[in-house]
Image: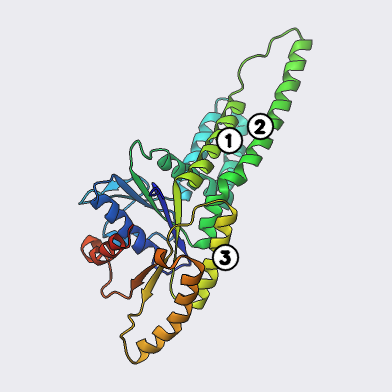
Amino acid sequence: MTPPTLRFLGGKGGVGKTTLAAAVGLLESRRGLRTLVVSTDPAHSLGDVLSCDLGDEPRQLPGGLWAAELSGEIQARRRVEQVAHDAADAVPREVMPAVRQHLQRAADSPGTVESALLDRLTELIEQVPRHWDRLVVDSAPTGHMLRLLQLPDLLRPWIEGLARQRERARGADRMVAGMLGRSDDEPDPLLQRLHQRRDRMQRLAHRLRSDAAVHLVLLPERLAWAETVRAADALAAAGLRLGAPVVNRVVPPDESGLLAQRREQQDAVLAQVRHRFAADAVVEVPLLGGELVGATELGELVALLDRAGW
């Protein structure tokens, strides 16, 4: 299959998604591809793994990789500021304090934060392949990742409903204007924005299904495997492409003592993973030494992914 231009690394918290996302980004950039790796996890640690300070705007690192940590809260505040600025031209001055208070409450709501985060991620996806050859996403834990990926399909009917309500209101306005002998044929800026946002979500949903792959990361443990199965089913139901899963921190088979017992427990889970997915597609990452922080320490993991055909 054609290598995906968009890769999402997802899974249960603490399984090593961020480390693997950083390694995938380094691998792609070392192949000469313009690569951006971004974190959408509120508990950002991508900068820690790459040993640098990151923010919302992509930053180029030594070696050519670009990286960023996206904040839904920052994006929501920016959106509110823009809406307040636009409202100042259309709303009476005495009403603006109440409008600002309402907008501030909206900015703090989870739905607004999620939507704003999706908008920022959409901006970056739209820059592929014009500005970036590859985009790697270090996702939030499974539930948040699934909701973010499904959000374009969830938002479209809601936007279409708002557009229909606005069209009915505009129809009533035209009727009243006609009765008064006035013309009201000017384009409606709000309706135009709603249509633009609907079309943008439709394009994003198509990109996610055609150009993206979601790689589920797990530890060879029963709880992580159970969550992975549910996530794989949800991704398939949403029509999203499931990339090669990654089983992280696998104990080598030649260990003894306590680690040997651990390996026996892991073997039971590994057998289920290989049975559920094509055995040759599963990437097994051994338990590695060191903290795996910085491009140098990540080198072994980068080489392993390269050998696995990523």
State the mark number for residue 163: 2
Q: Amino acid at mark 1?
A: Arg
Q: Residue at x 71, y 32 (%)?
A: 165
Q: Residue 211 placed where, x, y %?
A: 44, 45
Circle 1 sits on which residue? 198
Q: Residue 202 placed where, x, y %?
A: 55, 38
Q: Earlier in the sequence, mark 3 or mark 2?
A: 2
Q: Secondary structure at mark 1?
A: helix
Q: Earlier in the sequence, mark 2 or mark 1?
A: 2
Tag 1 near tag 3, CB within 8 Å: no
- 208 to the left or right of 39: right
State the separation of the CA atoms marked 2 and 1. Answer: 9 Å
Query: Quarter of the image containing the C terminus?
Result: bottom left
Q: Earlier in the sequence, mark 1 or mark 3?
A: 1
Q: Secondary structure at mark 3?
A: helix
Circle 3 sits on which residue? 230
Q: Amino acid at mark 2?
A: Ala
- 218 to the left or right of 296: right
Q: Residue at x 38, y 71 (%)?
A: 248
